[in-house]
Amino acid sequence: MTDTPSGSRTLEVALGSRSYPIHIGPGLLGTPAALAPWLAGRQVMIVTNATVAPLYLERCRAALPADAEVRELVLPDGEATKTLEHVSRIWDALLEAGFNRRCTLVALGGGVIGDMVGFAAACYQRGVAFIQVPTTLLAQVDSSVGGKTGVNHPLGKNMIGAFWQPRAVLIDTDTLATLPARELSAGLAEVIKYGLIRDADFLAWLERSLPELRALEPAALAHAIERSCALKAEIVAADETEQGVRALLNLGHTFGHAIEAHQGYGAWLHGEAVGAGMLMAAELSARLGWLASADVDRVEALLEAAALPTAAPAAMGVEDFLARMRLDKKNIDSRLRLVLLRALGAACVHDATPEATLRELLEHFPR
Ligand code: NAD
Ligand code: MG
């Protein structure tokens, strides 16, 4: 990690010739030519949505060099736009502008924009450069790092996609000032996740710092984002395409996806479902004898401090959970594989949870 006089920090995702920097700091978007080092050529297309454009498009434009040939595309907001049809609109705009293989796409927005623009870049003329400029906490600590790109299919979320790494990730922490509080909490769920799976010291720091984070205190935010990105970068560098350790990033997600799907996507934010899901994983780990009940209490208190749910949806029964969880992508040969906690700060993938233990958890977990 390196520090610059302006207070921004830089980390690297180490992937050989596809390595890239993550810059984190306040005011990065207003900095003239901040995006210049990663442009493949002069042709640049900024893709954003109707919510983010009025807030940050101008600043993003200011971060490009004066001689860039800049186009802009503003898509509708929302998870419902994460479709092949909207990716096609990006390709249409690139072709209409006559953009060639040395063009660069800039994804300005949350994870929906980042995933779509990354996928558009992966396919346009068999792959062009793209830069992630994430503006939600979730995108800053999670979706913009790691190269998973794609869209939803009517039959399943994120079912069409590609691994395609960005040239750089530029995180302007000032953008969080306009983020709705609920979206901030959803991002905090993924931040807490990194502490739980891999870093007990960071977890203890989070326990002390959640009030500052929710108040958007700049130094606390920068540290939380940096630690989260560093932990994700480490895992991605070790396992780019999720053959092994990258699966640990799914702590709370098997329970969480079941909640999201059962409630209908959008009713619970992803981070909210993951929050409740992590508490379920912690409780199950305690039932397996790995965590003490005081550990589970710590997880619960942390989620409460982040304004995240600590109960499952009232109407969701044991069978509702089990049916959804059996569809999880991590399962192999119909064995349920869950990310659980050996200790706070040490996750593992486990495929031998007795069904009776899982049922007990699902029965007793608060609604
Ligand atoms: P999102 O992109 O829908 O953003 C949430 C809301 O905040 C939107 O309404 C957006 O317009 C608005 N917004 C964005 N920045 C803002 C700002 N600075 N101020 C005010 N409003 C702002 O949702 P998200 O939570 O960022 O991302 C969720 C998506 O990310 C999902 O589609 C999920 O599948 C994907 N994801 C991908 C990965 C990956 O590895 N690629 C990882 C996690 C999640
Ligand atoms: Mg997630």
Image (tube, helix red, strand yellow):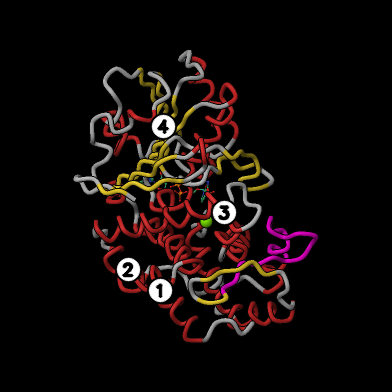
Q: Is residue 228 left or right of residue 367?
A: left
- Residue type, numbered disc 1: Leu
| Circle 3 residue | 265
Task: Please name the amino acid that badge 4 sits on.
Answer: Val
Which residue is tagged 1?
302
The amino acid pointed to by label 2 is Leu
Task: Relative to 247, say whether 59 is above or below.
Answer: above
Q: Position of residue 350 (x, y in %)?
A: 67, 70
Q: Which residue is mark 2?
A: 210
Sequence-first tag of 4 and 3: 4
Q: Nearer the viewer, mark 4 or mark 3?
A: 4
Pointer 3 or 1: first along the chain: 3
* Residue in front for this viewpoint, 354 or 324: 354
Queried on whether the Cβ of the residue with tag 1 lies below 8 angstroms from ligand 2, the answer reads: no
Q: What separation in Å lies between label 1 and label 2 (alpha carbons)?
A: 8 Å
Q: What separation in Å lies between label 2 and label 3 (alpha carbons)?
A: 27 Å
Q: CA distance from mark 2 to mark 4?
A: 31 Å
Q: Are marks 1 and 2 in contact (CB under 8 Å)?
A: yes
Residue under the point 40% across and 73% down: 302
Q: Say whether marks 4 and 3 touch (CB < 8 Å).
A: no
Q: Residue at x 66, y 73 (%)?
A: 317
Choose between 326 and 263: the one closer to the eye.
326
Q: Is residue 206 magenta?
A: no
Pointer 2 or 4: first along the chain: 4
Percent of width and height locating residue 252: 56, 66
Furthest residue in direction right, as rendered: 333
Query: Does residue 367 appear anywhere in the picture?
Result: no
Span shown in magenta: 323-341
In the shown orientation, is residue 35 left or right of residue 143?
left
Answer left or right for 217 relative to 117: left
- What residue type is disc 3 on? Tyr
